[in-house]
Image (cartoon, rainbow, N blue to C red):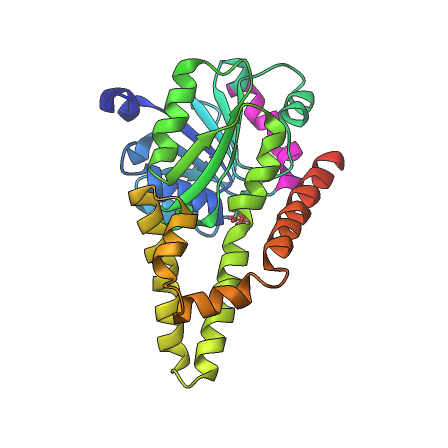
């Protein structure tokens, strides 16, 4: 999207915690700070945001014509902030919600009128501009607004658009929650190699770098993972020995079951709306 257009976009943030803060950091490079209005619950932190040039307060602004309102409060707080967001939505602002388990229907029902709503499921990789996000837009979101979301989220990492809203729960399984499983895998690898005598910090540094290097290689080359595995696992070598053990048990089934559990939990949360 045009740099001049981006410089004129006005963004209202409802919530600025882990995720809201990460999005603000990623977008501050393309949107001037004075075009942000950030609303938090507690007064602490407001002056630090103001010192960075942002408008910030514990109250929603009266005279701020937002083009986009980012809903970055906890899911249980979404209902509470929607009346403050409603005037912006009435004026045609896009509501961009990162709240897990809060559907477009939930948002529109609680607003009391149809609105342009996009849902985004990012992950904490956004904090290092290496996020992986899935987005869904309802039919009221214009092509220009979708373009704006794509431009903004491209500053945060990789993102995909979803054709159906329920696929957000599969995104939760593959990237929203997976940083925890990946960190777990990395710690298992670290512990196993520390048990062989490596210093724990050295083992962790090597394990994390192996994860990063593998991901980057596969992303950059586009090589199918099965080919890549064959390349690394020389017949009769150490990698083949490890892969024989890894694939002889339930690893793949357990990963599938973990993903299903994540998606199911996300679906249940929607039903509790
Ligand atoms: N963290 C993740 O990895 C992740 C991943 C995907 C999606 N999400 C989604 O992102 C959303 C935010 O999660 P988070 O981890 O960033 O939560 P968080 O760190 O607890 O931040 C919540 C923010 O909401 C603010 N807030 C609370 N009540 C408010 C109110 N009444 N009016 C205005 N602001 C209010 C808080 O203000 P104070 O700063 O003053 O406390 C805080 O800035 C959630 O809906 C979650 O589902 C998070």
Q: In this view, does 222 lie to the left or right of 39?
A: left
Q: Quarter for ligand 1?
A: top right
Query: Would you identify the image quadrant in which residue 8 lies?
Result: top left
Give coordinates of residue 39: x percent, y percent: 49, 38
Assign the N terminus to one quadrant of the image. Answer: top left
The residue at 55%/14% (across/down) is 139
The residue at 43%/21% (across/down) is 146
Question: Compared with residue 162, is residue 207 higher up or lower down, i.e. above or below?
Answer: below
Tell me, yes or no, if residue 41 can be seen here: no
What's drawn in magenta, residue-wise?
A: 75-88
Give coordinates of residue 95: x percent, y percent: 51, 25
Tell me, yes or no, if residue 221 can be seen here: yes
Q: Is residue 140 magenta?
A: no
Q: In this view, does 226 lie to the left or right of 257?
A: left
The residue at 56%/19% (across/down) is 138
Question: Compared with residue 152, is residue 198 higher up or lower down, i.e. above or below?
Answer: below
Query: Would you identify the image quadrant in which residue 212 lies?
Result: bottom left
The number of discs equals 0
Q: Is residue 87 magenta?
A: yes
**Residue at the extreme right of the image, as rendered:** 272
Q: Is the magenta stretch mostly helix, strand or loop?
A: helix
């Amino acid at each position: 999207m045009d740099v001049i257009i981006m410089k004129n976009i006005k963004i209202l943030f409802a919530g600025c915690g882990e995720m809201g803060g990460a999005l603000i950091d990623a977008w501050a490079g393309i949107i001037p700070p004075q075009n942000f209005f950030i609303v938090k619950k507690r007064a602490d932190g407001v002056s630090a945001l103001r010192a960075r040039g942002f408008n910030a307060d514990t109250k929603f602004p009266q005279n701020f014509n937002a083009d986009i309102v980012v809903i970055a409060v906890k899911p249980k707080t979404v209902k509470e902030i929607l009346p403050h967001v409603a005037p912006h939505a009435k004026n045609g602002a896009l509501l961009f919600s990162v709240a897990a388990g809060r559907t477009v229907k939930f948002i529109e029902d609680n607003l009391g009128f149809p609105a342009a709503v996009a849902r985004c499921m990012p992950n904490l990789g956004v904090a290092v501009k290496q996020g992986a996000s899935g987005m869904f837009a309802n039919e009221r979101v214009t092509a220009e607004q979708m373009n704006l979301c794509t431009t903004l989220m491209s500053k945060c990492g990789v993102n995909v658009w979803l054709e159906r809203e329920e696929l957000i729960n599969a995104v939760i399984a593959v990237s929203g929650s997976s940083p925890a499983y990946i960190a777990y895998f990395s710690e298992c690898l670290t512990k196993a190699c520390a048990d062989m005598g490596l210093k724990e910090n050295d083992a962790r540094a090597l394990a994390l770098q192996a994860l990063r290097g593998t991901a980057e290689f596969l992303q950059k080359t586009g090589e199918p993972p099965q080919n890549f595995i064959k390349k690394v696992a020389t017949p009769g070598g150490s990698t083949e020995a490890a892969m024989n053990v890894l694939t002889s048990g339930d690893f793949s089934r357990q990963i599938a079951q973990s993903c299903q559990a994540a998606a199911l939990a996300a679906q249940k949360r929607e039903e509790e709306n």
